[in-house]
Amino acid sequence: MRRQVCDDRVALMGLGFPVTSFSYPFSSDTPPVRQIVSDCAFNSASATGLIRNPTGCPNCPLAETLLPLDPFRVRAVTSIKADWTLEDLKSLVIQAEGAGGG
């Protein structure tokens, strides 16, 4: 896992991308994985499915805190689905604004 995370960051940087943040595949973040991401020189990482959204997570917070409690576990909504409407997306922004988060 360490090789994949670090080598992929280096490869993307070699293509000229300014790589600073990581997104856990399938929100597979655990303390050991978070440590690997940090060791590979990322500044932050996001985990999806941890913010209340139109398709679920009714007990999740309405928004991530500003500043996030853990920069290597920045909470985000689930992956945006193809059937989400503009209203669904707007509701997420309004929800975050109303909760004082981002």
Image (cartoon, rainbow, N blue to C red):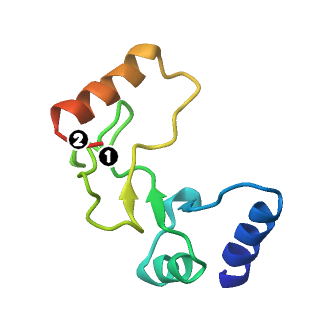
Amino acid type, callout 1? Ile
Q: Quadrant of residue 24?
A: bottom right
Ranked by sequence position, the earlier of labels 1 and 2 is: 1
> Which residue is at 47% across, 76% downward?
34
* Whether residue 75 is situated above or below residue 78 in the rendered picture: below
Placement of 33 over or under 26, stated as above or below: below
Q: Is residue 72 left or right of residue 5?
A: left
Picture residue at 22% right of the left edge, 32% below the top: 97
Secondary structure beneath disc 2?
loop
- Image mark for residue 24: none
Secondary structure of the residue carrying tag 1 is loop
Residue 53 position in % (x across, y down): 34, 36
Residue tagged 1: 51
Look at label 2 and name its amino acid: Leu
Tell whether 65 sits left or right of 27: left
Mark drawn on residue 62: 2
Q: On screen, 9 above or below 18?
A: below
Q: Nearer the viewer, residue 44 or 57?
A: 44
1 and 2 marks in contact (CB < 8 Å): yes
